[in-house]
């Protein structure tokens, strides 16, 4: 019996050693190792980096970056990377210290949201005077970040620099076309119909770019809580303005907007939940909303459809 076990061990060992085509271990992946924090930043890096980049995205679909805490595994993943791309502007609130430590140790870190000129940023009084981090809701503004990402990848991987820059230019053209489509679709709403009420105040850049008055039950950061007075005040606003629909978000629990809906109905006015918007996260990978463009199109169709009564 013992001899048979030894023989079996030798056979298994020989098979394992012979797994490679020529009896050697598979070659190590030589691609640029990059980590992105959110799905939105990850989509931008993936689009420009292409197959030359080995990308690891820390937060999955539906994850709220305002509340996300880096695990020990996340820290190991970031430490093993050659660069970290994140939104910045305090979007990743609880990860800010970790990201600063990584940068202080010589790690290449790129805050994509901070590539936007500071003069174009919105300062939020409800967010301790810090700039609103949700810059991607203005498609034209987000398009300006393509060059920032392309240049960062080119610096990290000079042999493929031209490839990254070409992809950046091509994606800039795609986003310019997307911005034009958003403007055309929004034109189906009269100016008085452009009032957007959501779970948290993430759509300020969208409102500024496309002429919407925006109200969020929670503040710019979901780390803040909505009190009873906040719900009552916003309910009064909805009734006064006769707003037909409010919206939940994939990365914020729906209970906040559901409570708002109940408060409105208690005042004798019917307001609908117009649908679910992708705010701080994209949809599931492999679905149309798993890309930035797909999420933008889905949001705009949901908003316009509900507010214009097209549903």
Image (cartoon, helix red, strand yellow):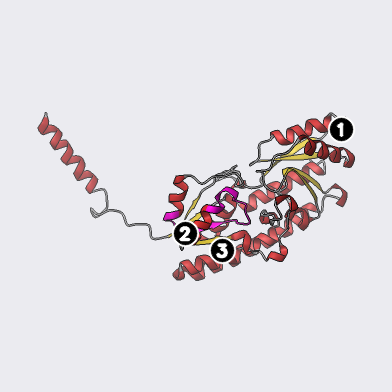
For the view shown, which residue lies furthest in the right direction? 240
Front disc: 2 or 3: 3
* Residue where numbered disc 1 is placed: 269
Disc 1 element: loop
Which comes before the other along the chain, label 2 or label 3?
2
Q: Find residue 149 and report its horizontal and vertical position in percent.
A: 56, 63
Q: Residue at x 21, y 40 (%)?
A: 12
Indicate which disc residue 62 carries: none
> Would you name the residue on which mark 3 appears?
149
Foreground residue, 294 or 270?
A: 270
Q: Tell me which numbered mark, 2 or 1, is placed earlier along the sequence.
A: 2
The segment highlighted magenta reads 79-97
* Callouts 2 and 1 close, C-beta under 8 Å: no
Query: Can you give x and y, in whole percent of width and height, for residue 139 in the image?
Result: 69, 58
Q: Name the residue tied to disc 2.
A: 53
* Quadrant in the picture for residue 165: bottom right
């Amino acid at each position: 019996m013992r001899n048979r076990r030894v023989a079996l061990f030798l056979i298994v060992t020989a098979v394992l050693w012979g797994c490679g085509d020529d009896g050697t271990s598979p070659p190590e992946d030589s691609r640029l190792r990059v980590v992105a924090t959110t799905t939105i930043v990850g989509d931008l890096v993936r689009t420009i980096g292409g197959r030359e980049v080995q990308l690891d995205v820390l937060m999955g679909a539906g994850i709220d970056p305002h509340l996300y805490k880096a695990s020990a595994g996340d820290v190991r993943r970031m430490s093993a990377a050659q660069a970290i791309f994140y939104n910045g502007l305090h979007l990743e609130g609880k990860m800010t210290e970790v990201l600063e430590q990584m940068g202080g140790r010589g790690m290449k870190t790129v805050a994509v949201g901070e590539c936007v000129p500071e003069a174009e940023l919105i300062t939020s009084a409800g967010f301790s005077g810090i700039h609103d981090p949700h810059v991607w809701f203005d498609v034209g503004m987000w398009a300006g970040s393509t060059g920032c990402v392309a240049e960062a990848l080119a610096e990290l991987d000079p042999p493929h620099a031209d490839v990254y820059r070409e992809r950046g230019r091509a994606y800039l053209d795609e986003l310019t076309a997307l911005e034009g489509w958003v403007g055309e679709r929004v034109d189906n709403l009269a100016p008085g119909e452009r009032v957007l009420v959501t779970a948290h105040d993430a759509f300020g850049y969208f409102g500024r770019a496309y002429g919407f008055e925006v109200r969020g039950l929670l503040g710019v950061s979901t780390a803040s809580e909505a009190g009873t007075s906040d719900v009552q005040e916003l309910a009064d606003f909805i009734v006064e303005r006769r707003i037909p629909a409010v919206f939940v978000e994939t990365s914020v629990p729906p209970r906040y907007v559901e409570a708002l809906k109940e408060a409105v109905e208690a005042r004798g006015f019917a307001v609908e939940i117009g649908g679910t918007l992708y705010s701080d996260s994209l949809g599931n990978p492999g679905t149309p909303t798993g890309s930035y463009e797909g999420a933008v199109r889905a949001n705009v169709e949901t908003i316009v459809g509900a507010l214009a009564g097209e549903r």
